[in-house]
Amino acid sequence: MTLSAAPRLLLVHAHPDDESLWTGGTIARYAAAGVQVTVVTCTLGEEGEIIPESLRELAADSADQLGGYRIGELRSACAALGVSDHRWLGGPGRWRDSGMAGVAANRHPRAFAGGDLDEQAAVLAAVLDEVRPQVVVTYGPDGGYGHPDHIRAHDVTMAACEKAGGVARIFHAVTSRVATENGVAALARVADLPYRLPEPDELPVTDDAHITTTVSIADVLSDKLRALRAHTTQVSVWQSGDGALCYALTNGIAQPIPAAEFYVLAAGDPAGAEADLFGGM
């Protein structure tokens, strides 16, 4: 990196665990390299499903305490990834997890996806003005897989970057079709896989022709795994004796964990960015 100022990376995610699932290796890689990494989380993830039966009463349809519990999970995940600067958009609980598209939670008065976009963008723009990141990461226009909060996180981020100015590059985190297919093929050869393999349309993927940046996370993969395991209510991580890796959410579908994370450059100069979010800057 040849930046004149200390490199600063800011990532905007919808719920606790998204930072680890989508960008955990990237966060760990840059934090270890001395980059100032700021993670902004937009909701507490109150509407998430819960894997451990012993914690089922935290759910939104019971005690509705999952959001508070996930604050602790996210704190542990950030520690595993080396994040020292985490922010809740508007403060913890200002906007609530909207749930998947078409559910009653979409209509909650604090639902993030139904909130005032201008207000949300102004709050994030104030963070951008304070942190002054050269690089910002969020999701693509479809939110990666259509979740209303992911779509809103995209909209808020793009609007806030326009308001604040000064951001040199904006990236959208995506999943590689080739890496996913190769990972699923490897998992298919595992005899004792505890999850079911995905059908072709069950994992969101991006055509690799659209991917502009591939960030190697091989050296920090263990940090990503520790962060994923911190999200006990949401994620189960499994590793075979011969090193095959995957995780599953509450749906029990095996999802491979590649040794790289993938991005599409949405704004900024692409020169030098093929393998480094800050490359050429």
Image (spheres, helix red, strand yellow):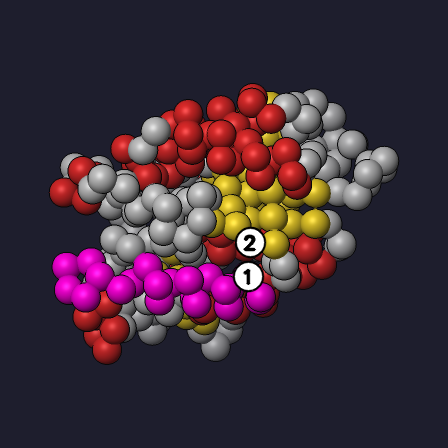
* Residue at 73% in and 50% down: 35
Q: Left or right? Give the position of 254 relative to 158.
A: left
Q: Is residue 171 visible?
A: no
Three-letter code for the amino acid on which mark 1 is drawn: Cys
Q: Which residues are magenta?
A: 60-80
* Residue at 42% in and 30% down: 119
- Asked if labels 2 and 1 touch by Cβ distance under 8 angstroms, the answer is yes
Number of numbered discs visible in the structure rendering: 2
Q: Nearer the viewer, residue 144 or 245?
A: 144
* Residue at 65% in and 50% down: 37
Mark 1: few/some/many CA within 10 Å (<14, 14-19, 20+): many
Position above or below: 243 against 262: below
Give me the disc on residue 78: 1
Q: Nearer the viewer, residue 146 or 245?
A: 146
Q: Is residue 63 visible?
A: yes
Position above or below: 266 against 57: above
